[in-house]
Amino acid sequence: MAPVTFWRAWSIWAVSMTVTAASLGYTAFHPLPAKLANQAGSGLDWAVGVVFVAAFATVGALLAWKRPANLIGWLLSATGLAYAVGVGGILLAHFPQTLTLANWLGWIWLLGLGLCVFVVLLFPTGHLPSRRWRPVAWAAGAGLAAWVLGNAFAPTIITNSPPVRNPVGVTGPAGDIFKIMAAGADVLIAAAGLAAIVSLAFRYRRARAAERAQLKWLVYAGVLIVAALLAEVPIEQLMGAGNAANDLQNAVSGGAVTLVPVAIGIAILRYRLYDIDRVISRTLAYAIVTGLLVGVYAGLVLLTTEVFGVHTPAAVAAATLAAAALFNPVRRRVQKVVDRRFNRARYDADQTVAAFSVRLKDAVDLDAVRDDLAGVVYQALEPAHVSVWISQRD
């Protein structure tokens, strides 16, 4: 069964990557017309798209191969394939004969997003938290089905702007029903997505240590997505409206979303699973330090230029040197405060080792030192077994 699973998983990966590479590679040498090029995005958008598809497809294939009984790997593979088909629409848009099909495939993007609802709902075990969450799963499935059917047979291609005639669309009252299905599917998928996020809180309350660490990885990636979305506002204010700001916004948000499958892969494969507390503490510490130093830098620049009237490069250089000099002292203090709150295990371990080093200065009994060392290791790391080997010298 293992070879069959291997070929299935990596065949989906190969198709996803081939379609993505072929579409963007052809577009690089055969640019689209100006109107279609604006819809397809820039070279930076394409690079983000490649990384996005590669992340979902690769992690999905790896999990489907290593954990075939867990549906999350297959869902990630399907998500990567859906987005690859969406990117394939760029290739179809080059040819007049397939331009309508390229527009018709616009619904595939929300399908990939809808599959992510199931990923969140089933994470990390591949099963629902309990039977009470079955209506959410049914709602997500119904929303996806309604979205596909509604867009496939609506009188116009809804996802195209402006809407154009759908060659396989149904007219009359039946066509209106398909349009209503597509509109209602948006609401249904969004509601199911919110419920799936809420389900993580219920899982966390009943989870043990390992599963809680798995959930922390997913939540950490989700927080980064929210931070990336919030960062889009100052980016547009600083750079102004335009292609450059739009490209940077897409790169930031797309890069953050790419971290989701990576976090899921680490959590399910349990590779460095318990490092999540350290990752969170480091992220918070450096974010706080960056904010403080930016504030110090801006304050010094304003002080020297506006208050003292010094308008020379030396003022900016002095502010930069001051901020650089403060980096390590501020980082150490902030890291210590953050560790006390978000990485308590590491903080307690550091305190235990520090206390042991103080006791070691006055220790003279080798047996007492050995017992104390074993106790420190057990208290800091909580291993299943501790043994101390002492070299015998003549």
Image (spheres, grey):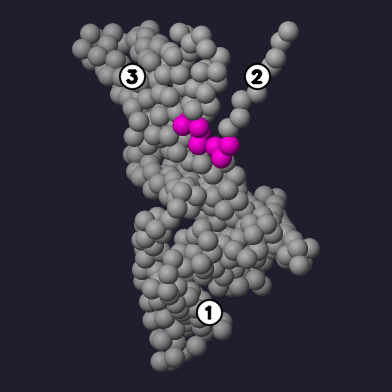
Residue 297 position within the rendered picture, expressed as x and y whole percent measured from the top left: 33, 19
Q: Is residue 141 in view?
A: yes
Lower position in the chain sequence, tag 1 or tag 2: 1
- The answer for how far apart the CA atoms under marks 3 and 2 are is 53 Å
- The answer for how far apart the CA atoms under marks 3 and 1 are is 55 Å
Residue mark closest to the camera, 3 vs 2: 2
- Sort mark 2 into few (<14), some (14-19) or many (20+) by Cα contacts within 10 Å: few
Residue under circle 2? Answer: 390
The answer to which image quadrant residue 385 occupies is top right
Please name the amino acid that badge 3 sits on: Tyr
Question: Image point 34% across, 34% down: which residue?
Answer: 341
Asked whether the residues under the numbered discs 3 and 1 touch, taking CB atoms below 8 Å apart as contact, a structural biologist would say: no
40 horizontally vs 283: left or right: right
Residue 364 position within the rendered picture, expressed as x and y whole percent measured from the top left: 51, 9
Question: Image point 64% across, 59% down: which residue?
Answer: 67
Question: Image point 58% across, 66% down: which residue?
Answer: 71
Give the secondary structure at mark 3. Answer: helix
Extreme right residue here?
3
Lower position in the chain sequence, tag 3 or tag 2: 3
Residue mark closest to the camera, 3 vs 1: 3
Lower position in the chain sequence, tag 3 or tag 1: 1
Give the secondary structure at mark 2. Answer: loop
- Sort mark 1 into few (<14), some (14-19) or many (20+) by Cα contacts within 10 Å: many
- Sort mark 3 into few (<14), some (14-19) or many (20+) by Cα contacts within 10 Å: many
Q: Which residues are magenta?
A: 378-385
Residue 12 position within the rendered picture, expressed as x and y whole percent measured from the top left: 69, 63
Q: Is residue 28 magenta?
A: no
Please name the amino acid that badge 2 sits on: Ile
Task: Classify 250 as above or below 177.
Answer: above
Question: Image point 50% across, 32% down: which residue?
Answer: 378
Residue under circle 3? Answer: 297
Residue under circle 1? Answer: 152
